[in-house]
Each structure stands twice: as C-alpha cells, then as structure tokens.
Amino acid sequence: MKVEQIYTGCLSQGTYYIECNGEVAIIDPLREVDQYIAKAESANAKIKYIFETHFHADFVSGHLTLAEKTGAPIIYGPHANPTYDCIIAKDRQVFSLGQVTIEVIHTPGHTLESTCYLLKDADGKPHSIFTGDTLFLGDVGRPDLSQKSDDMTTDDLAGMLYDSLRGKIMTLPNDVMVYPAHGAGSACGKNMMKITMDTLENQKKMNYALRADMTKEEFIAEVTEGLAPPPAYFPLNVKLNKEGYEHIDSIISQGTQPLDPASFEAIAESSKALVLDVRSKTDYASSHIPRSIFIGLDGGFAPWVGDMITDITTPILLVTDPGREEEAVTRLSRVGFDNTLGYLEGGIDAWSKSGRELDQITQITASNLADMNASALYDMRKPAEYANGHVDHALNTPLSEINDHLSSYPDEGHFYIHCQSGYRSLIAASILKSRGIHNFKEVIGGYKSLIETSLPIVSTKTACSA
C-alpha cells in the first residue's frame, strides 16, 4: 500500500494518491490531472476511483476531467447532488482497492455533503483518514460556506460538525494518520498548523476544537468566532464543481495564445479585458502597462486573484515572464478563471519597443519615510496583523477591502502605503492607479522594513484576541 500527499502551496491544498496491487484511488484532485495519470502509468497501475470530500469552494477540482480520461467513477458522500453521473455513496459504504479498503464516513458540518474517507490496511486496521475540510490540523472547517437551505444557520452546521467530529472521527484509534484537504494559508479555516499531516492523537492534544471536555455550545461559539468574510469567488467555484466546467486543455490552449502588442491592445479594448501582470513585484514597479493589475505568480497568486477579481468570467490578458504563460493560465483555472484570452508575446520589452506608453510605481524606502515623519500612512495588511503591531499613526485599509476605502485616501499631497513585505501593497498600488489615484508612494519592504526604523510601533491587540 502506498499513500502519497501531493501538496500545492499556492492553494494550501492536499491531493491524495493511494495505490495498492495495481489499483489507485485519487482524493480531491487538482484540475490539471495528467500528473495523476502519469504517476499511475509509471507504477503500471490503473486509477479505479476518484473520491471527492465535498463540493470545494476555494478551487475547481479535476474530478470530471480525470473521470473522462480514465473511466474511473466519481464518488461523493450522502447528500451530494451534482448534475453529472457519479456514485453517491452511503454512510459506511466500503470500496475495495487491491488488498485494502476505503470506508465512507459522512461527516456533515462544513457542508451537508462533507465526507471523510477511512483507509484500512489488508488486515482491516484503520490506517489513515482523509478529512477534506471537516478536520484540519489545528482547526476544523468553517461552517459558514455551505450552500445551505434558508432554514439552516451557520450555528446549525457548526453543531452538526461537533457531532461528526466526536461521533465519527475522535472515536478512531489514536495512531490513525489525519490527512486534511488544506493547510496554513487557506481561507477555509482560521487557525491551521503549518504541518500537513499528523496523528489523530496529537490533534486531540493540539487542536482547540477537539478538547475532550468541550461542550457543543462552546464548540459553536469558538468555531464561528472571528470568521472573515469568504472570498466572492467561493460560491462560483462550488457551482463549477457541482455542474461542470470546460476541459482544462481547451482553457490552456486559448490562454497561451501569443499576441503582439498591437493585437494585445486591440483585444484589450474590444473585450474590455483585465490586463493582469504576474511578473515579480520589482519588475512591475519599474515598468508596466498603464492600468494593468499586478498579482505576482511568486506570491499567494490564486487566492488573491479570487479575492480581488470577483467575477470568474472576467476576460483576462496576461503579462508574464517568458516561459511562465502556461503556469499562469493553469493557476488561474484552478480557481475557476477560465477566460484568459492570451498573453503579450515578448513581454514588457515588446510593449516598450513598440513605442506604447509605460507606467511605474513610485516607491520610497522605509528609512526615508521615517526621516520625513510622514503622517499619511496606510497599512494594507489584515486587521489581525495590524492589531498585533503597526506604525503608530498608520491607518488600516486591508487590501481585500480596498475598494471600500478609496474615498479614505487624500486627494491632495502624497500618501504612503505598505503591507508586510511588499506583495500586497503592490497589488494595492496597481488597483489605485487603475482607479486614477496616483498621489502615493509604496514603501519598499513594507512593515518588515518599517520596524527597523525609528518610527514608533504600537499594538492594539487585546488579551482576549491573543
């Protein structure tokens, strides 16, 4: 028996490859599925099952494409209602895989159809459990994302999650390995650990939601406290996962069409496409197409795309480093952005050589800002980061809420923006300039650089939020 976790850092997402005696099961595959097919073929094995733990909100699964290419059935737990053919398994139903078995354990709470899969070895001993978004390491799935009926509240789902955890997961042997769908950085939870696999025994010690003496009322209160609003693209991804989507090969073929500057400009104007620059923050700051939006591939790319571009059908034109066009299109498609129309062939150099206009971000070092003692400083980090420590006079306007704060920025004189290290503030800078706001400077190195200066740092974190 072989169990392999295939972890994708950009999405903080874990896919699982289970193999035994030439038969393979895939749990929660990414949209680009050829990697799983190649892995099985290299082992002279056949993909027998595709298990889905629930209808994912934060990414588009590859279940449909993988089923089409391999003939393997898609399996969901009870209460799933997709529009395509699949197996809706019963609670405790067992599927054989070589000499091992996979047992369906329906664990509603994160969503109504949420299901875990218990892997048992050839002797019938529980080996590992694939918990989807039901149980994370250090946390549990948030109960406010389900496409629930009008008569079911977040608290109702949290109560169901409490019962699922205590009645079906915490009763398993302590040495069972826990393999969740997500790790630290995912918006599907709020307190995840950085490790990506652990024993159930250690989670009972480390996970606040698994305290042995925890009442259901305490669980509901703690699990629902401090939940940030979910990104706007989450329900749109659920819809794609339930109802289907276009084949990723077609998405990549369309999105990787090379366009010379004239064609790029013409398509941008005719389609009203968003020009998305995914290069490094340094390269974007020094030179970019006017009104283009920066979200760099070498940061939290897919989640920030989903957060900042609320409509997944938005037409997109790409500016990339040479050779990274397919990577950009693929990573966009992982979160449902399938309408990439092509990329600028030759990149920003080709645009410049064509004589077309360029823009840049005006920046300032943290030390120069400190010497000026500038007062109009805006912190683009999350409220919790800001509360933990910030420059004394800085105002918090989180990047995810920037459109709600546009009227907060001064019309006259200069103001200054920063985040933790410069990635988010460059995204903010690109959005401000696209809205016609240019009277600002971005602080190079962000808060990490500012704390090394003489500027006073304060904290507004209260004891109860520590």
Image (spheres, rainbow, N blue to C red):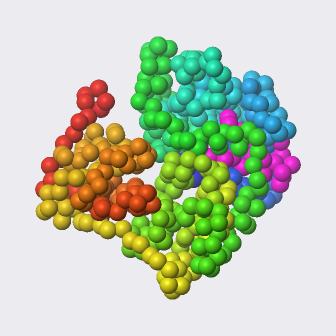
The residue at the point 55 percent across, 71 percent down is 320
Q: How many marks?
A: 0
Residue 175: percent from left, percent from top:
56, 32
In-front residue for pair 358/65? 358
Location of residue 77 with respect to 445 vertically, above or below? above
Asked if residue 282 shows in the view, the reply is no
In-front residue for pair 123/194? 194
Residue 233: percent from left, percent from top:
59, 44
Quarter of the image for the C terminus: give it. Answer: top left
In-front residue for pair 412/108? 412
Hey, which quadrant is residue 325 in on the image?
A: bottom right
Magenta segment range?
Answer: 50-73
User: Does the magenta run of residues contain 47?
Assistant: no
Location of residue 204 with respect to 281 vertically, above or below? above
Location of residue 332 with respect to 107 vertically, above or below? below
The residue at the point 58 percent across, 70 percent down is 324
Hey, which quadrant is residue 271 in on the image?
A: bottom right
Hey, which quadrant is residue 436 in on the image?
A: bottom left
> Is 131 situated left or right of 450 in this image?
right
Residue 13: percent from left, percent from top:
58, 47
> Is 36 situated left or right of 457 in this image?
right
Asked if residue 411 shows in the view, the reply is yes
> Is 66 situated left or right of 302 in this image?
right
Location of residue 89 with respect to 405 vertically, above or below? above
The residue at the point 62 percent across, 50 percent down is 312
The residue at the point 48 percent across, 61 percent down is 293
Residue 103: percent from left, percent from top:
73, 30
Quarter of the image for the N terminus: give it. Answer: top right
In-front residue for pair 57/70? 57
